[in-house]
Image: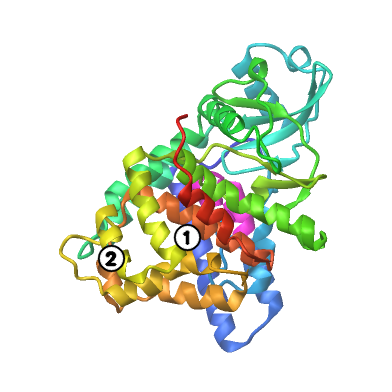
Amino acid sequence: MDRLPTSASERVGATGRVLLGFGRAGVQRLVRRSTDDDRALGELLVGELDRMKGLAMKVGQILSYMEVGLPEETAAVLARLQRGGEPLSGERVIAVLEAELGAQVDVLFERFDREPVASASIGQVHRASFRGREVAVKVRYPEVRETLEADTRQIGAIARVASMATSVDGPALVAELRERILEECDYAHEAESQRRFSRLLADDPVLVVPEVIAERSGAGVLTTVWWDGAPLSSVKELDDADRSVVIGGLARLAWGMLLGHGLLHADPHPGNFLVAPGPRLVVLDYGCVKELAPDRVALLRGLLGCVVEGRRGEVMTHATALGLVPEHGRVDPDELWELLDFLGAPYRGTFTFDRTWWETSMKRWKRPDTSLRHLGMPPDWMWVQRTLVGLHAVLVGLGATADLGPIARAALSTPPTSQ
């Protein structure tokens, strides 16, 4: 592929093909149930979303692991989006790389592999050698900002309509989403986030943040030390002790960074993790990092403490202070508890993250006929929800059974540190 589709007509056309594929699949599933049809739908989605990149591909990545009701065969095919499959051509990538870093590729690197090891939503990753070290070189797609602008404009129009007669400020959410996504296009910003996580996790015995190579990084190129590792799904093959270590690392990344430092690694899809010997959990991709103000972290600490510890009677007060429940108070406390219990139940003892629990919880979150339609959606809560719900989705995908309560309670009880 030499270019991304950037025009409104190209992206609307691709979206139309995806929606048409969903429509046809729905009809076929009413008439007859076929795993071949389910796989065909997955292939259609992968082809279109991979070609579109940007926000469209991100949505596909989320669909692949969030257990949103897609047929199992469809979701299995979509999982390929976690590594990508339709890269930019080697010639185009090298042209972008040389323009960004101001020298020819054979001067910049001792070796540069033209075939990428992964092609993601914002850029693609190539393996190379620099000063005798194996490195990963992430190169941004040249048209990706334009695709993101086009996609967020479409979402913005939908959000203005969708937020009518609700307490959700749709345009504010889209503005927050746009800001985070455009930050992902700035690899210099991502490099700083990665260095920050590296400093804060330097003493963690499990979590690994690859070192940034500043001399070969810029706004459109990010070079880091290469780490060998197996896909996150390999956790299933580990013995009980090592599996517990890796799963604990996933939970600590979410809860510890949120409550200890006000930072969210808000893109928890499985393709962003590798399992290395030790075991160690290598955390990749720091483009989607959200920083929360200290006062917001304090409010979150209050709400999350209630749901983890089962203090049902205090949830409404904390949810209102956070802005999740509007001041008019038309949200039923029992319905609110049932909704938020999804975030807390896994931390009150040994818990199995199974699909039945997930599907039941998701149905509760999606019900439109309850007082929960009056809930607000503070922009920062969107990222907290994505991080914690995403963590649970990954653990469901791994079929994990674990007692993660000590990790959550340790994060809740440890005072935040300065950064």
97 in relation to 253, above or below: above
Q: Is residue 358 visible?
A: yes
Few, some or many residues within 10 Å of mark 2 (<14, 14–19, 20+): many
Q: Residue at x 69, y 32 (%)?
A: 210
Q: Is residue 222 left or right of residue 379?
A: right
Task: Please identify the quadrant where the N terminus is shown.
Answer: top right
- The extreme left residue here reads 328
Residue 173: % across, % down? 33, 49
Residue 46: % across, % down? 63, 57
According to the image, label 1 marks what residue? 16
- Of circles 2 and 1, the one toward us is 2
What residue range appears in magenta?
A: 45-61
Residue 297: % across, % down? 38, 45
Q: Is residue 378 a member of the stretch shown in magenta?
A: no
Residue 103: % across, % down? 68, 11
Q: Amino acid at mark 2?
A: Met
How would you classify the magenta stretch by its main secondary structure? helix
Q: Is residue 396 left or right of residue 365?
A: right
Q: Residue at x 57, y 33 (%)?
A: 200
**Residue 316, which numbered label?**
2
Q: Is residue 46 a member of the stretch shown in magenta?
A: yes
